[in-house]
Amino acid sequence: MEFEYKLETKERLDKWLAIQLPDMTRSHIKKIILAGLVKVNDQDTTVHHWLKNGDKVFYNSDKTIKKSEGDTIEPLIIDQTEEYLILEKPHGLLIHPTDQGETNTLADWVVSKFPKLSKIGDDPARPGIVHRLDKEVSGLVVVAMTQDSFDNLKKQFQDRTIKKEYIALVHGKLINDKGEINTPIERDKKTGLMKVQTAKTGGKIALTLYEVMKKFINYTLVKVVIKTGRMHQIRAHFYSIGHSIIGDKLYKTKDIRKKKKVLTTRIFLHADYLKFKNLAGEFREYRSALPQELEKILDNIK
């Protein structure tokens, strides 16, 4: 099956193929690209390849790959170098086992695909993993492929020089188009959840910046940048100012708990941008589009 890209503006391969192959989900399109069933100008390609006018796209429809039935959740490889992997973690996938001993985590997947990574890092339970996303949150994760890369990335996270951005949809209308939430947070010993310290005593320093992307009647879409990486930081911070994130089952204000209408069964929080330096000191940056189920929510609200 062959297509020709005839637009003057550039478009990302996976997004454009989703239009050409409407019977396929975006996730399955990514899988056929990663499986080598799609070529651009007779060359192997990547999910985030940008098409230009005149490009010839070939899809080998004679070969198939098994569609996921949802029983096994796996990340997608966005980029792979000798130093690191860039993964797109789907919501519902735990980064690493907790004290409950879970299996089918991102850490399990990493070791199954790249056995040598079992010796990378400073914790066998977190092979090559230098940061985390909540199980319910989707988006970009970087995994070190070598110990030097692990040490390099870990230091950048510790020094807070890595840039991470998120997209979130929150309840209500934020008054200011830009703002910051600069309040310490700590774990509540009774509930186990993170709570904000209104008086700046106790807890760990936590700083969250946000910028409004779009305002709806009852919701606000925001770009979020965190300067610290505390557990549940974004969720706890927006809860503390009365704007819980859509779909968050843990941090919900009283008025939200009373509502019967549910927009989504998952949290509307996606890690869409990551920027860091490789071992050569060169900046590398990656973006991840909103998952299809979150895009649909935006299409269906006013």
Image: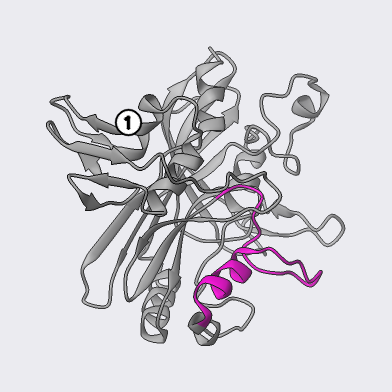
Above or below residue 162? Residue 248 is above
Prevailing secondary structure class for the magenta stretch in the rendered image? loop
Res. 78 image quadrant? bottom left
Above or below residue 26? Residue 22 is above
Tell me, yes or no, if residue 15 can be seen here: yes
- Residue at label 1? 16
Left or right position of 14 against 107: left
Magenta stretch encompasses residue 97: yes
Where residue 65 appears, as percent x and y from the top left, is 51, 48
Tell me, yes or no, if residue 174 can be seen here: no
Left or right position of 285 against 138: left
Residue drawn 51% across the image and 34% down it: 25
Residue drawn 80% across the image and 20% down it: 260
Magenta stretch encompasses residue 138: no
Res. 14 image quadrant? top left
Q: Nearer the viewer, residue 73 or 165?
A: 73
Q: Which quarter of the rendering shows the N terminus?
A: top left
Left or right position of 234 against 155: right
Where residue 284 appears, as percent x and y from the top left, is 27, 61
Q: Which residues are magenta?
A: 90-115
Q: Nearer the viewer, residue 96 or 219?
A: 96
Above or below residue 268? Residue 199 is below
The local crowd at label 1, few if under 14, some if 14 to 19, many if 20 or more residues have their Cα within 10 Å, is some
For this orientation, the residue located farthest to the right is: 190
The amino acid type, in three-letter code, at marker 1 is Trp
Where residue 271 appears, as percent x and y from the top left, is 48, 48
